[in-house]
Image (cartoon, helix red, strand yellow):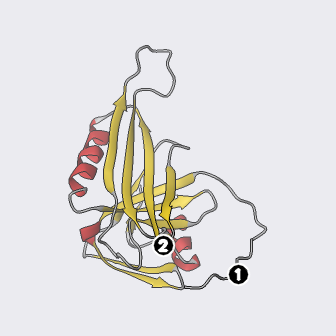
Amino acid sequence: MALAVYTKACEKNVGGNSAVYVAEVANVVSVTETAGEISAITMDTGKFFHEIQADLDSVVHTQEGAGTRSNIAYTHRVEMRFAKPSADLNTLRNELAAASACGILAIVTDGNGISWLVGYNSVDKFSRPLYLETDSLNSGAEPSEEDVQAVTLALVGITGYVSLPFDATLGAGIVGGTAVFITYA
C-alpha cells in the first residue's frame, strides 16, 4: 500500500454522536464495501439493528491505534450512559451480555451526520466484533449528587483496521430514519 495525497475539507466539524444502533453479528448476512465505505447491509430475515436511546451527549465512539512499524492494532469502543435504572434497561443490559457470546456490531452516527459501522472491517469481516466490556451502575451516595443513578455500558473490540463509514446514500437513510435494516425507537 502506498501513501496518497490527503486533502483537508474546509467544513464545520461537530463533536459528539447523535445515535447508536446495535445488532448481533449472527443476524447480519452480508456487508458490501465500495471504495472504503459501506454501501449495503443485508440482514437475516426478520432481523434488524435496533436503536439504543442513550442519554443526550453521553455516547462516545473511540478508536485508539497502538503498535510499532507494521503491527498496529485498533481498540474500538462505543460507550453509552443511561440515567435512572429500570426493568427495560436491565433487559437491554442482559441482552447485550448474551449477544456478547458471538459478538455485536454497532452503527454510530456522529455529530457531523456520518454513520460508522463499528465491529466490522473488510479483512476480518465478522470475526472481530464488539463485546460488552463494561456494565456498571453508580447510584451515588446522596440526593444532591449529579450524574448518578446511571448505568454505563461499553462495547469494545480489537482489530487491525479502522471503522468504516456508510456511503452518502445509505448514510442519509440511517440519519433520515428510513434504513430498512434498522428498527427506530
User: With 105 as the anchor, is 1 left or right in this view?
Assistant: right
Tag 1 near tag 2, CB within 8 Å: no
Q: Tell me if mark 1 has few (under 14), some (14-19) or many (20+) residues whose alpha carbon lies within 10 angstroms of its own.
A: few
**Residue 139 versus residue 127 in the image, above or below:** above
User: In the image, which disc is placed on residue 70?
Assistant: 2
Rendered residue at 24%/57% (across/down): 99
Label whose residue precedes the other's in the sequence (1 or 2): 1
Label 2 neighbourhood size at 10 Å, few (<14), some (14-19), many (20+)? few
Q: Residue at x 29, y 41 (%)?
A: 88
| Residue 53 in view of the camera | no
Residue at the right extreme of this rendering: 10
Q: Hey, what amino acid is under mark 1?
A: Val
Quadrant the C terminus occupies: bottom left
Q: SS for tag 2?
A: loop
Residue 172 lies left or right of residue 41; in this view the side is right
The N terminus lies in which quarter of the figure? bottom right
Viewer-side residue, 53 vs 5: 5
Q: Quadrant of residue 84?
A: top left
Q: Which of the two marks, 1 or 2, is nearer to us in this view? A: 2
Residue 181: image quadrant is bottom left
At horizontal 45% and vertical 62% (from top left) the residue drawn is: 74
Q: Position of residue 61 (x, y in %)?
A: 50, 54
| Secondary structure state at the residue bearing disc 1 | loop
**Location of residue 179 in the rendering, given as x and y in whole percent from the top left corner:** 45, 71
Which three-letter amino acid code belongs to the residue tagged 2? Ser
In three-dimensional space, the C-alpha distance between marks 1 and 2, rounded to whole angstroms, equals: 20 Å
Taking the image as drawn, is residue 19 in sight? yes
The image position of residue 174, as x and y in percent, is 50, 68
Residue found at x 55% / y 78%: 167
Q: Which mark is residue 5?
A: 1
